[in-house]
Image (cartoon, grey):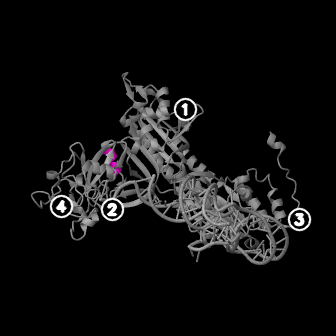
Amino acid sequence: MLGGLFRRDDSPVLLASSSRSAFRRALSSGESQLFPDNSMRWSQTFIPTLKETPADAEIISHQLLLRAGLVRKLTGGLYTFLPMGLRSLKKVEAIVRAEMDRAGAIEVLMPALQPPEIWHQSGRYQTMMDALYKVKDRANKEWVLGPTHEEVITHLVANEFNSYRQLPRNFYQIQLKFRDEIRPRFGLMRAKEFIMKDAYSFDVSDEAAMVSYRKMYDAYIRIFARCGLRAFPVEADTGVIGGNYSHEFMVPAETGENDVAYCESSGYAANIEKAVSRGPSVSTPADSSGPAPEKFPTPGVVTIDALAKAPFHVPPSHQIKTLVYMVDSKLTVLLVRGDDQLNEPKLIAQLGSIAVRPATADEIFAALGAHPGSLGAVTGVPASIPVYADRVLQGAKGMTTGANEDGHHYRHVEIERDIRITQWLDLRTVQAGELSVQVGSPLKIRRAIEVGHVFKLGTKYSEKLNATFLSEDGQRHPMVMGCYGIGVTRTLQAVIEQCQDKDGILWPLSVAPFEVCLSPLSVVPTSPAWQLAQRLYAELEAAGIQVLLDDRDERPGVKFKDSELVGFPLRLAIGEKSLAKGEVELKVRGGTLQVVKAEEAVQRIVDWVHSERAKFAA
RNA sequence: CGGGACGUGGCUCAGCCUGGUAGAGCGCUUGGUUUGGGACCAAGAUGUCGCAGGUUCAAAUCCUGUCGUCCCGACCA
């Protein structure tokens, strides 16, 4: 081994110099046999803690990632993992891997660089276009950087599996994914490049696919629990990935990017993009107020709120909000109640559309002859334009809406009498306080971070990419698929977001970079504290405890602050004063100080670590 | 893509309004004193003031453009 030739000599360190810095240099060059892995000594690894909060970090977990020296930013949405961050990341990965294996999934590794052809084949070259990174090779051929791997795995399975006898199968991988995010933010939360675990199941039938789905669902519950994370499954929209059944795993946090509606009595919980209720808290008027719509002047009134105020006094619940959208390039009129919000994901899901956006003021005027703020569907909507209305408006009478003429509205509108409705749909976003469908308790809404997502995909990809099998009767069928993702890097940050206090991170033992931080308050080689520290270090190592020795020649305050900032679950401090009494100090991060006899320290630590490990065990 | 804010040493920021050639704290280096909760004293090093144009005798400062970062939005007519 070449390495042996260059191994540093372990000869005694000369301490001739009285200079402090010379002493430090001398210290760091010794003791290499005790520390075969340099990462076990603070001075020999790399933990660049920051006293001050970096200016471009907004949320607490992002700040702590930087302050605790876990990651450094290369540029927006791209980060380098430093030793402590990497150790935690690997632990999260290990938990994910163990639970996937246990659930019967098979690990593979797929290419990050992919041919665009398979994306055209699945149809997602179009639907995911904006999120796809594309690169060209020297021959000017285009490639894409994989934002996910349904296409690749389905291609593999299509080629390798042909019989019902070979199914079910579930393949998973843990690797980098690339997405051209509109706006990367919050550190690892929404990055251009991130580590994801994704699993893909292939079954012979819907029922069999549900079994696979359930296995993953259960595995996810265990994974997040083992990471020390409180995460909850909620019903979810499937989005561009397709499919018809899906749950997201959410970590409640104000800094999350999702809203979850939930009912504490029934346990119902759903992403706001999907959530339903028994309807608005304020009912819709259903009594006729006039024989026909009546136009009245409303100069300058272009908002629901303005119409609700003097001199009109029309409550928002008595108004029809008219929205105009381009749905797959087709101009479309959408009606919701004045106090409701259109739910775009619901619209997309129900119409099966791909690209949806609000129409521009120019497009609207060209088609309807009026500007936003005066729009309505009573008159002036050409028959070629579909009008979709929210079901809450069914039977509504005595409503007020725009007259499709700037500066005018209609009152006494009976929606079913006066408006041509193409189709009734669920278009509204539920609001807090509305009653849940199941038991009629009020829904609450809170922010959350999405850390995992399980989908039942059906045969969308297997049909397009020819992943078929021969059944017992010799018939060819498309495989029924499911896909299951976990944002590994995001999960890591979610742990920090959930487990921290004013002093820093409070790692759950299962994902902490080290289980124990051993802090001798003197590192002078001849000092009792240092000598004891070396002995205890060796004993803890021998006992299989992951321990980091803070061998820096720093003042106690610095060591304490740093160990709390980085967040090691347990700290063993050895100071000259207590050691004179034969004692050392144990402190669980976030807990109270315990003074114990030096001889008992190792056993106490081993016991504590073992009991803590048991909490997060499989 | 729209709106806003910001780019000054490794980090946090001041200086800009009112142009005159760059500062503080932290960190870093050296020496000394300290040594149980982010020490103190002294002496140092470190900045093309994001970049490119322009105005001016003179630009960190004013103007234009550009790049980058962060925040909000990208349904609420």
The alpha-carbon separation of the residues under discs 2 and 3 comes to 71 Å
Q: Nearer the viewer, mark 3 or mark 4?
A: 4
Q: Nearer the viewer, mark 4 or mark 1?
A: 1
Q: Amino acid at mark 3?
A: Ser
Q: Earlier in the sequence, mark 2 or mark 1?
A: 1
Is disc 2 in contact with disc 3, using a CB cutoff of under 8 Å?
no
Q: Nearer the viewer, mark 2 or mark 1?
A: 1
**Residue A31 visible in the displayed image:** yes
The alpha-carbon separation of the residues under discs 2 and 1 comes to 51 Å
Q: Nearer the viewer, residue A302 or A394?
A: A302
- Chain to which mark 2 belongs: A
Q: Are marks 3 and 4 on the same chain?
A: yes
A74 versus A158 height, above or below: below
- Magenta stretch in the rendered image: A343-350
Q: Earlier in the sequence, mark 4 or mark 1?
A: 1
Per the image, the residue denoted by label 2 is A432
- Specify the principal SS of the magenta part: helix
The alpha-carbon separation of the residues under discs 4 and 2 comes to 21 Å
Per the image, the residue denoted by label 3 is A17
Q: Earlier in the sequence, mark 2 or mark 3?
A: 3
